[in-house]
Image: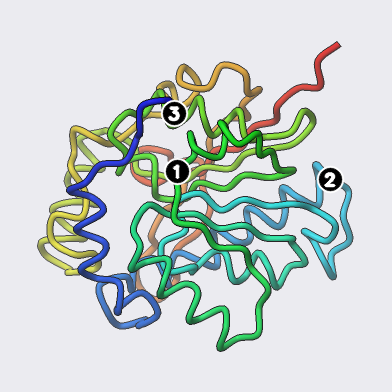
Amino acid sequence: MSASTMDPAEIAKFNALAAEWWNPNGPFGALHRLNPVRLQFIRDFALRHFGTKPARPLGGLSVLDLGCGGGLVTAPLARMGATATAVDAAPDAIGAAQAYAAQAGLDIAFQQTTAEALVEAGAQFDLVTALEIVEHVSDVNAFLNAAAALVKPGGAIILSTINRTPKARALAIVGAERILKWAPAGAHDYDKLVTPEEIRAGAPAIKWDEPVGVTYAPLGAGWTLTSDVSVNYLIAGVRPVSG
């Protein structure tokens, strides 16, 4: 049995907030505002890599949402045509995601489990998403290695997280959590943030693209994709077909 990458303190933190996942003005409000940009990135990548149709960018694809939380990303993935599986280690978060999916009439397979348990079960998917989760696990390299193993040869993985830079500390932790109250206090530990270089090193089986920045522009412009990866970023990669 492989060691678990679950961090009990992180699970307890998100369990306590489970009822607030779908409240756009609650503690996860920043994720609601960030979601359109993340989904645009996933959609555009899928159209390029898988050659799918714009009306159903994930049509015909098996998609795993790792660390799904309350399902803020999983639900739109299903609406984009994915055969969606969503997993999280926090039982109350899974409960919130299941309740939303049932109310919305979405067919999503939810499991309270871990990436490494899925690997042991032999599961693989066309596309794996792991958004805002890698900074909350107990062992980043073990998590990334498991996530990569869950990608079918020729399939892809997309991650998003916060870079470990002084600018990220100032904006994403001090500014967003303590001043603007965009995220729950203590949501992020600076020492657990992960750089793009560490993503690459933790999953060398993946051929990674260059990271893409996600930047907040004030005065109503909101979140946009940019070349600045010093705070938030997305990174996609493909598992090569061997031989």
Q: Name the residue under label 1.
A: 114
Can you name the residue that lies furthest to the front here?
1
- Marks 2 and 1, how far apart in space? 26 Å
User: Hey, what amino acid is under mark 1?
Assistant: Thr
- Marks 3 and 2, how far apart in space? 24 Å
Q: Name the residue under label 3.
A: 196
Q: Which of 56 and 38 is in front in this view?
A: 56
Return the disc, 1 or 3, that comes first in the chain's sequence. 1
In the rendered image, which quarter contains the N terminus? top left
Secondary structure state at the residue bearing disc 3? helix
* Picture layout, residue 20 above or below residue 73: below
Place residue 235 in its image quadrant.
top right
Place residue 216 in its image quadrant.
bottom left
Residue 237 spot, x, y in % from top left: 64, 32
Residue 41 spot, x, y in % from top left: 62, 53
Return the disc, 2 or 1, that comes first in the chain's sequence. 2
Residue 226 spot, x, y in % from top left: 51, 48
Cβ atoms under marks 1 and 3 closer than 8 Å: no
**Mark 2 neighbour class, 10 Å CA radius: few under 14, some 14 to 19, many 20 or more:** some
* Picture layout, residue 33 above or below residue 241: below
User: Hey, what amino acid is under mark 2?
Assistant: Phe
The residue at 43%/21% (across/down) is 197
User: Hey, what amino acid is under mark 3?
Assistant: Pro
Indicate which label's residue lies in the foreground, 1 or 3. 1
Residue 7 spot, x, y in % from top left: 25, 42
Place residue 20 in its image quadrant.
bottom left
Secondary structure state at the residue bearing disc 2? helix
Q: Nearer the viewer, residue 105 or 222?
A: 105
Coloring scheme used: rainbow
In the rendered image, which quarter contains the C terminus? top right
Q: Mark 2 points at which residue?
A: 50
* Picture layout, residue 33 above or below residue 25: above
